[in-house]
Image: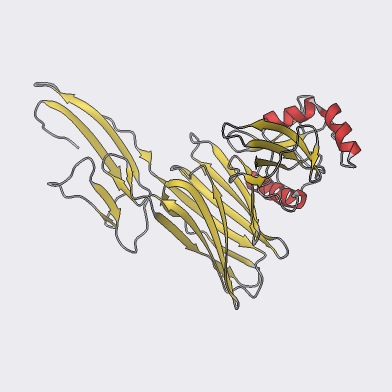
Amino acid sequence: MKLKLMEGMYHVCAVAGAGSDYVLPSLEDAKMESVISLKQGKEHADLMYAKNSVVILAGETNKLDLSLERKVMMMQEVKISNVPETVTGVSVTIAPLYENLCLDGTYSGINGSRTVTLTNESGTGVWKNTDGIYLLEASGNTTVTVRMTDAEGTKSYSYSFSNGLKANYRIRIEGTYISKEGILLSGTMTGAEWAGERIISFSFNEDGSSGTGTVPGGENVIEGEAPFAGTMYEGCYVLSNSKNGDGSITVVLMSGTNKFGLQFDAGDQTSVSSAVSQAIAELAVDGIERWRLPSLEEVKAVVSGYDKINKVLKGAGAETIVPDLSFFYVTDEGTISSYCVKGNPDFGKATRLRAFATLIFKQ
């Protein structure tokens, strides 16, 4: 576009993708805080936004380039497998989401949500949706709720995590219904090449939820005296014991048993995440929720202190650590990887998995 303007400083805003499905401010009434809202019953488009400032002086010709940034995320696919034949409906809801985009590039409205209804692929036990749905960013701590309906009514399974879903990421959620344990879900957030990758993995059933990856989903709060580091608690090794400012004590547990021989495609993080989530669910101890993979620092602490740890594990009849093997851990970006003290980690069937959990003890 070309404009002839008076002298002065101008803020130039550009919104791409806001077509006829949106309510736009009029030319006369447009302000920086003006809201671009979605019309009732319509779906978000691939919204992008740019803003820049330019000073116009008399007799000068100015050229301004705007680099657009995506303001939405896209839910590529939601799939739940192994759903019982008695189930007549499955849906997934994500909340809270921002409701509108403003002309200054900010969001407004914090109580939005989006429910995706899944379609039954007859005879396969799979319910899925692959519409490619655009969503504005999460406005706070995010909750994913799965609802399954049968003749007895509707059951809801929810999982919350503190890291909100951000724009410019593609989201894929894959779940497997396990008749005795509830639902096992793994989610992969894959952004454009400059946005990186983050894994969200969690399992949940009627009794609660557990998570792995960079979004732990909260802590287990327990009333009582905290166990000391280097001891056993509920069949698990107490890796650390640290006092918090409010007087509570944070304890990190490591499962007393391990898993290996996991079946996955090492080049596909979704496949790895699904296999890891199922293994963690099998290692989980009753009464303790939100089991997860360890961080790199936690794995290194275990390997470096294996001699002392093994004495405690052996005395309790638990499985000991073999320090020169590879161990699963999750990176700061949420990618599942493996660590080996020898510097050449295996990432396959021989990689060991220990489940970790964080507990908060309050007197």
Residue 318 image offset from top left, x and y in percent:
87, 42
181 to 240, vertically: above or below:
below
Residue 124 placement, left or right of 344: left
Specify the farthest residue to the bottom: 151
Front residue of 25 and 264? 25
Residue at horizontal 69 percent and vertical 40 percent from the top: 293
Instruction: Quadrant for residue 60, please give it.
Output: top left
Residue 195 image offset from top left, x and y in percent:
49, 36
224 to 125, vertically: above or below:
above
Front residue of 301 and 331? 301
Front residue of 217 and 241? 241
Front residue of 98 and 26? 98
Residue 191 image offset from top left, x and y in percent:
50, 41
Residue at horizontal 62 percent and vertical 57 percent from the top: 175
Q: Quadrant of the N terminus?
A: top left
Instruction: Quadrant for residue 106, please give it.
Output: top left
Residue 98 image offset from top left, x and y in percent:
38, 49
Residue 155 placement, left or right of 272: left
223 to 196, vertically: above or below:
below
Residue at horizontal 36 percent and vertical 52 percent from the top: 45
Identify the image's colour scheme: rainbow, by chain, secondary structure or one colour. secondary structure
